[in-house]
Amino acid sequence: MKKAAIQDSTDWTAYRKKHKLAKGTKIFVCPAFYHFKKALLERGWHENTDRYSEIFDLKFMVKKRDLYKPKDANGTKLETTLYDFQTINHYQGNGVLTSKVGLCQSLQNLRCWTKDSMESFFPKCFYLLSSDTLACTDRGETDLDGFIEYFRYTYALSTLRQFIKKPDSK
């Protein structure tokens, strides 16, 4: 462990020297999220573009697999050492909040905790899959069926509003 810390320190020193960074400069890894990267760069952080590097203060990844090094020649996943001062944004099961589908499902499950509908504070959303793997809602119909019904309703309402505004138009 002590040797790993010394080796890490040497790697960090070499990295800082190569990129001409001051000792206190914070380093982040983030392969996407342009605005997030821009905000960190404006605050004086340095971007390490090697997504598998262990040289970072903050690693911002979407998928759990991106937190690890690629597999070795035998197909074994290589472990990444995470030190106390390093921060990663990933935690198990965060897709329920960080993905559109996860957020949609979480909000639909809100009815278990309150009588308020998610549409009272969040735009209408649907969980759409291929026809053989459709999710079902509490009414026993698929979200695709609900989406089609809502689309038809919205289209009909829009047509009626146009007719009311201009009754002579076809």
Image (tube, grey):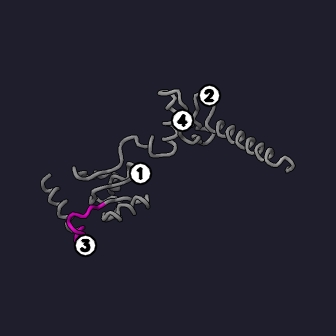
Residue 59 appears in which quarter of the rendering? bottom left
State the residue at coordinates (23%, 52%): 85
- If you read the primary sequence from the N terminus, does the residue marked by circle 2 or circle 3 appear first? 3
Residue situated in front as seen by the camera: 12 or 156:
156
Assess whether mark 3 and mark 2 are in contact (beta carbons under 8 angstroms). Answer: no
Q: Label 1 vs label 3: CA separation?
A: 29 Å
* 4 vs 2, front mark: 4
Disc ID at residue 20: 3
Q: Name the residue at 77% across, 47% down.
A: 162
Residue 86: percent from the left, percent from the top? 26, 53
Q: Position of residue 17 (x, y in %)?
A: 22, 71
Which residue shows up at 17% across the image and 60% down it? 7
* Contact, mark 1 vs mark 3 (Cβ under 8 Å): no
Residue type indicated by callout 2 = Gly
Q: CA distance from mark 1 to mark 2?
A: 32 Å
Task: Give amino acid for label 4.
Answer: Met
Residue reaching furthest left? 2
Q: Which residue is mark 4?
A: 118
Q: CA distance from mark 2 to mark 3?
A: 61 Å
The residue where tag 1 is placed is 62
Q: Is residue 166 above or below residue 117?
A: below
Residue segment shown in magenta: 15-27
Q: Position of residue 163 (x, y in %)?
A: 81, 45
Mark 2: secondary structure = loop
Q: Which mark is residue 140?
A: 2
Give the residue type that dot 3 points to: Lys
Name the main secondary structure of what is drawn in magenta.
loop
Q: Residue furthest right?
A: 168
* First in residue order: circle 1 vs circle 3: 3
